[in-house]
Image (cartoon, rainbow, N blue to C red):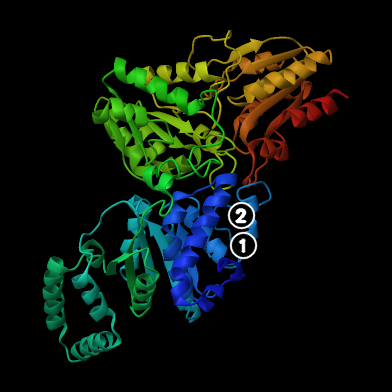
Amino acid sequence: MILDSIKQAGDIKKIDKADYPVLAQEIRDFLIRHISKTGGHLGSNLGAVELTMALHLVLDLPKDKIIWDVGHQSYTHKLLTGRREGFDTLRKYGGMSGFPKRKESDCDAFDTGHSSTSISAGLGMVCARDLKESDETIVSVIGDGALTGGMAFEALNNAGKLETNFIIVLNDNNMSIAENVGGLSNYLNGIRTAEPYLELKEGIYNSLMRSGGEGLVRTIQKTKSSIKQLVVPGMLFENMGITYLGPVDGHDVNAVKKALNAAKRVKGAVMVHVMTEKGKGYAPAERHPARFHGAEPFDIESGMPIKTRDKANYTDIFSTVMCTLGEKMEEVVAVTAAMPDGTGLKRFRNMYPDRFFDVGIAEEHAMTFAAGLAAGGMKPVVAIYSSFLQRAYDQIIHDVCIQNLPVTIAVDRAGLVGADGETHQGIFDLSYLSSIPGLTVMAPKNKWELADMLKYSVNSGIPCAIRYPRGEAYDGLKEYRRPIEHGKCDPVFEEDEICLVAVGSMVQTAVAVRDELKKEGHACSLINVRFVQPIDEKLAEIAGRHRIVVSMEENVRSGGFGERFLDMLEEAGYAGKIKYIHAAIPDVYVEHGNVDILKKETGIDRESILAKIREALS
């Protein structure tokens, strides 16, 4: 196999041009075979094979830099930089990350897990290069979906001022920006980047400016732009001061190489528009790109997941209740940021298309857009993953909560999410959401409470956030389904020795801890917090009657529920009378891996909490 000969960066340059298609097929076969076992982002990587090969043929890594956006399309890059063996442990604890990691390889120039960051990061590297007077080539590779993010356009606007080379590759596998694929476009690209043309253009410009011909220069530039509007695709970028090349067939290695070499000659920011097909070469991924965006282990022949779900997950419950609310209330509208499938809003979109809004990868816009909907008399529900919601923090404060607008924020994937690692763990939301005055923050103990909280929030008339985890919905404690009262906790069991005070997903763990303590002869209370903000003042009174109090949350310690609860105990005069155990995630970035392993490593699993309680008892 040709792939066997690639041991490190640069080895691809030793391969004969005639063998490029063979290597591309070997890479696809390798990715399909391994990701079918480990899971991972398949569709985007199958589409970026030839593009990545061309980048590695044109560039000199690790001297030159590639910034991937979003980083999940970097699997071929990892293969071509000698990390083939790492795919056996892809996204497993202690194994290779599914995203670029600087600590993993010097060929990974920048860590990327959230979208729309690559152009900003690349521009920073370009300016650093110029300040150091070095000569490396900087390339930012951005997907068409990531280009919908406002941050990308902020960076493009800034990049238009450059007078030094910066290459932006637009990997377009869905959105059609331009139709002009063919001879005229190729002809213009060739002329505009040829050395004689560039030298003549620069010479004329300098001569005119030296002789006081600024007015003539402006006239020529204006006329040139008017003509280009008629014949050149990508004028949106041209008008921002960015040279546009393309579109280019992204599955033709030689065509992409030619475009990249041309782009290297441009003294300024240049965009190379590459057209690719998501899931290229694997029929199930071509037919179902959404399913193979982030795939679980699957059967290669059929493309179907190996593991089937017997029980509904929290996203399923959210989806069902949203459809019910949509049927009962015409004011209910749904907003998401490019995640209708992931957040469970696909069914709502199908049932109520006029009341569903996908704003693209633009969480900040999504939140202010929802605030506008609320100000206009609607009842918006914004569904966003916890780690992506971090981007909308200012909008939650400035546009939603200061005006006390009735926006419901459905915080999906809250807590540890597993294989996607540091950039995707939802372990900060209790801290940053609880810091916002006027925002009610809730966490359900099971699937029924999620349904009740969503209904409560939509009818509350105030800003509310409901955080719930990824994965199977807990169906225990069904008999303890008490009505939701604003700011009131839910005492599930009340005894007198040990008090477990648990937030949301940690109630299930608390039940397991309590069961074990009961076997050991200890009287144990279990309080379901429900409201992280405002915290029920009754909690301090209940906890104060116990010898040991344990707060449990799937969130970092700093700024989380446990810190605020301890303050409440101290103010009530109980802190010196009890032993307080704060079970929370340490203030660290948690790497990728199985969630059960991560809970053990961070000390919030059943056995870790029991060990702390037994130590306190002794």
Using the numbered discs, state the Cα–Cα distance from disc 1 to disc 2 in whole angstroms: 7 Å
Marks 1/2 in contact by CB < 8 Å: the verdict is yes
Q: Residue at x 71, y 24 (%)?
A: 550
Q: How busy is the neighbourhood of tag 1: few (under 14 within 10 Å), some, or many (20 plus)?
A: some
- Asked if residue 133 is positioned above or below residue 522 in the image, the reply reads below
Which disc number belongs to residue 12?
Answer: none
**Vertical comparison of 237 with 73: above or below:** below
Residue 302, percent from left and from top:
48, 40
Amino acid type indicated by mark 2? Phe
* Quadrant of the image containing the N terminus: bottom right
| Residue 248 occupies quadrant | bottom left
Q: Position of residue 439 (x, y in %)?
A: 45, 28
Position of 445 with respect to 544 (left or right) is: left
**Can residue 484 be seen here?**
yes
Specify the quadrant that holds the C terminus.
top right
Using residue 378 as the reference point, say whether residue 75 is left or right of it. right
The relative height of residue 406 versus residue 337 in the rendered view (above or below) is above
How dense is the environment of label 2, judged by Cα within 10 Å: few (below 14), some, or many (20 and up)? many
Q: Is residue 58 visible?
A: no
Q: Taking 437 as reference, is 553 left or right?
A: right
- Disc number at residue 87? 2
Of 169 and 560, nearer the camera is 169
Judged from the image, the secondary structure of the residue bearing numbered disc 1 is loop
Residue holding disc 1 = 83
